[in-house]
Image (cartoon, rainbow, N blue to C red):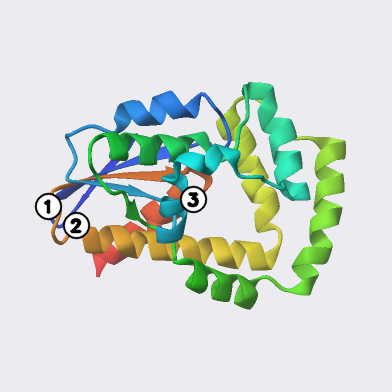
């Protein structure tokens, strides 16, 4: 857990590892009545989907990147979709009669951002990166080190890196806005985006 403050509001940022089943109980245990707001790096549409009881029955067709990511992350424990950490947020909030706040762009805005950032060259580079990843592997000292190294690989594609920066900026702005009328916030965000969100919050706070 990472702690910071803005506008007199306490912000606790909980980094998560997307995919690990063990994250479910860990994340759910952090969602308590100590917070005025539970925020999560999902879109408003995703929150509705995760809150659907039939979610587990939906078919999921993983991309090549998702499959390789799961292959390596599986070394640290059971993997599942939809993301267990996000299910923990929606499940815990539902039990408490709460609605989690979406930190991610809405689907329409995200699609526009993706199309503006990710170009054909990035898509062509994906296959080369996947082959390199399968051949050379990653630092598997811990799930955290793997995820960060995986994100470094993704950042080698300019479009994906630009999209990640836009996401971090958007999430930081959403958190900053929440601090204007909340006293305490728990923000559940994927590990690889946390450092960028904190940096953006610092820049907003310095204005």
Residue 165 as seen in the image, left or right of residue 172: right
Q: Secondary structure at mark 1?
A: loop
Say which of 172 and 113 sits in front: 113
The part of the image, by quadrant, that contains residue 68 is top right
Whether pointer 3 and pointer 2 mark residues with C-beta atoms closer than 8 Å, the reply is no
Q: In the picture shown, does residue 51 fall above or below 120?
A: above
Image spot of residue 100 (x, y percent): 31, 49
Q: Residue sitting at 75 percent across and 66 percent down?
A: 122
The image shows residue 112, relative to residue 66, as above or below, that is below
Q: Residue at x 52, y 68 (%)?
A: 110
Which residue matches tag 1? 8
Q: How packed is label 2: few (under 14 Cα within 10 Å), some, or many (20 or more)?
A: many
Q: Residues within 10 Å of mark 3 (few under 14, many from 20)?
A: some
Q: Quadrant of residue 119?
A: bottom right
With 94 as the anchor, is 127 left or right in this view?
right
Name the one closer to the observer, 22 or 3: 22
- Number of callouts: 3
User: Which residue corresponds to mark 3?
Assistant: 193
Q: Nearer the viewer, residue 191 or 69?
A: 69
Taking 64 as reference, is 15 left or right?
left
The answer to the question of whether label 1 and label 2 lie on touching residues, with beta carbons closer than 8 A, is: yes
Residue 2 falls in image quadrant: top left
Q: CA distance from mark 3 to mark 1?
A: 24 Å
Q: Is residue 137 above or below residue 128?
A: above
Question: Circle 3 — which element?
Answer: helix
Q: Going from the N terminus, do you reach mark 1 or mark 2 first?
A: 1
Q: Which residue is mark 2?
A: 179
Where is residue 140? Give x, y as percent.
Answer: 68, 27
């Amino acid at each position: 857990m990472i702690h910071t403050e803005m506008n007199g509001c306490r912000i606790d940022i909980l980094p998560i590892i997307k995919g690990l089943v063990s994250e479910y109980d860990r994340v759910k245990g952090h969602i308590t009545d100590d917070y005025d707001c539970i925020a999560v790096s999902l879109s408003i549409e995703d929150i509705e989907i995760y809150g659907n009881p039939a979610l587990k029955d939906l078919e999921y067709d993983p991309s090549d990147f998702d499959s390789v990511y799961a292959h390596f992350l599986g070394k640290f424990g059971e993997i599942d979709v939809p993301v267990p950490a996000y299910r923990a947020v929606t499940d815990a909030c539902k039990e408490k009669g709460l609605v989690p706040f979406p930190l991610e762009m809405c689907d329409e805005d995200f699609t526009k951002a993706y199309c503006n950032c990710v170009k054909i060259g990035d898509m062509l580079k994906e296959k080369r990166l996947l082959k390199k990843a399968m051949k050379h592997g990653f630092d598997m000292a811990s799930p955290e080190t793997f995820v960060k190294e995986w994100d470094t690989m993704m950042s080698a594609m300019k479009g994906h890196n630009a999209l990640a920066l836009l996401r971090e900026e958007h999430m930081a702005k959403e958190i900053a806005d929440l601090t204007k009328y909340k006293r305490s916030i728990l923000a559940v965000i994927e590990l690889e985006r946390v450092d960028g969100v904190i940096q953006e919050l610092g820049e907003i706070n310095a204005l």
